[in-house]
Amino acid sequence: MLPEVTEESRPFWTGGFDQALLIHRCRFCRQYFHPPVGACFRCRSRDVGPEKVSGRARVAAYTVNHHPWFDAFPPPYVIAAVELDEQPDVRLTTCLVECDTEQVTVGMPVEVVFDEQDDVALPFFRPVTS
Ligand SMILES: [Zn+2]
């Protein structure tokens, strides 16, 4: 169940080994975008590449999963779309960890944590407690 890593998505899936959430950004129009591809979908520039972001985000939508899809995740757990603080129209689909499923709300601030699995470091998010 691990992601397929391509040349363009490798920074996203491996930046976590250096505690870095790397999101593709266009160097021409300065917009972030996800998933990572070789050209900016806004201005079609090919001058794009991964840049480190803060790892802070907010929950945009979520669903509580009660089915045991992953050995590593005993249900219930939360699958969420989170919006990056840098640019809220950049959304990542992720799992929320270290949280009570009853306490998840839309707009809740979260921060990235990395779960190292073989040769990838999966970016998950947990509530910001401070
Ligand atoms: Zn662009």
Image (cartoon, grey):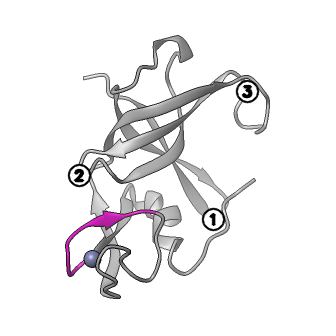
User: Does the magenta run of residues contain 29?
Assistant: yes
Give percent across and percent down for residue 105.
41, 20
Instruction: Measure the alpha-carbon separation of dots 1 and 2.
Output: 27 Å
Residue at x 55%, y 17% (from the top left corner)? 101
Graded by Cα atoms within 10 Å as few (under 14), some (14 to 19) or many (20 or more), the crowding at tag 3 reads: few
Q: For residue 39, which quarter of the picture?
A: bottom left
Secondary structure, mark 1, is loop
* 48 sits to left or right of 96: left
Q: Choose the circle earlier in sequence order: 3 or 1.
A: 3
Residue tagged by mark 1? 119
Point out the image quarter for the C terminus.
Answer: top left
Instruction: Measure the alpha-carbon separation of dots 3 and 1.
Output: 22 Å
Which span is picked out in magenta?
27-34
Identity, as a three-letter code, of the amino acid under mark 2: Glu
Residue at x 34%, y 25% (from the top left corner)? 108
> Which of these two is toward me, 66 or 2?
66
Graded by Cα atoms within 10 Å as few (under 14), some (14 to 19) or many (20 or more), the crowding at tag 2 reads: some
- Residue 69, labelled with which disc? none
User: Does the magenta run of residues contain 98?
Assistant: no
Q: Mark 3 or 1, which is nearer the eye?
A: 3
Q: Mark 2 or 3, which is nearer the eye?
A: 2
- Residue 74, labelled with which disc? 3
- Residue 86, labelled with which disc? 2
Q: Choose the circle earlier in sequence order: 1 or 2.
A: 2
Give percent across and percent down for residue 18.
40, 61
Residue at x 45%, y 38% (from the top left corner)? 125
> Which of these two is toward me, 58 or 129?
58
